[in-house]
Amino acid sequence: MLAHHHHIPNDPSSVSDHDLSVILQDPNDYLWFGSFSQGLNRLDTNTGQFQHYRNDAADEQSLSDNIIWSMHVDQQGNFWVGTNNGLNRAEQGFSNQGETATASGFTSFISPSSLQPNASLDAIRTMLEDQKGNFWIGTDGGGINYTAAERTTSIRHEPSQSASIPSDRIRIIIEDTAENLYVGSIGGLSQ
């Protein structure tokens, strides 16, 4: 039997929106839900209570946008959130001691990127950390940003090159057990 969590107006402990885009379970067993318009929600499965994280124009440590497309916890325990307006990293991250993100603890990376000047970090649709620890970010219009050894490279659609990705509108990046990458975009599948 499924339990239903509904958005209840004026109830800050309910989920912030009915329209959810992404779900992630963190190393401490909290469930995170990204919404299409009302930011990020963290569910404490023991209490059934939600905590909300939203963009606040007056708080530069809030999320950069309320449209959430992707989430990822990297090998170092950093919690990343991809929004319609950039990439966000929770300042506190996760650890074995049960620490988790706080409401005012996000650093935003927005184009032109403070990570790398040539990187496009507008709408972050997907993130992947490969088996070697390299970080891949798929954007909606800016192609792929690939970070290895603290150097970021932008991979874009090049119509004159047959080996190019078919579109800069990336939807998903996965890695199989043989370390092959697959990129799904508006223009098709690349390997």
Image: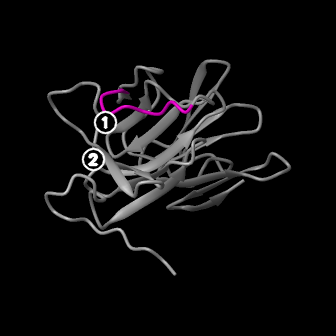
Q: Is residue 7 left or right of residue 29?
A: left
Picture quadrant of residue 190: bottom right
Main secondary structure of the magenta stretch: loop
From the viewer's perspective, is residue 29 above or below residue 129?
below
* For the residues bearing labels 1 and 2, Cβ distance under 8 angstroms: yes
Q: Is residue 11 left or right of residue 18?
A: left
Residue 43 coordinates in the image, percent (x, y): 42, 52
Judged from the image, the secondary structure of the residue bearing numbered disc 2 is loop
Residue 185 coordinates in the image, percent (x, y): 54, 58
Q: Name the residue that disc number 1 marks.
A: 63
Q: Is residue 109 visible?
A: yes
Judged from the image, the secondary structure of the residue bearing numbered disc 1 is loop
From the viewer's perspective, is residue 114 above or below residue 130?
above
Q: Name the residue that disc number 2 marks.
A: 66
Q: Which residue lies at the image location 68% right of the left edge and 31% below the top edge?
A: 134
Q: Is residue 137 visible?
A: no
Between residue 13 and residue 110, name the one nearer to us.
13
Q: Hey, what amino acid is under mark 2?
A: Asn
Q: Hey, what amino acid is under mark 1?
A: Leu
Residue 153 coordinates in the image, percent (x, y): 58, 28
From the viewer's perspective, is residue 2 above or below residue 139?
below
The residue sitting at the right extreme is 178
Q: Which residue lies at the image location 35% right of the left edge and 68% below the top edge?
A: 5
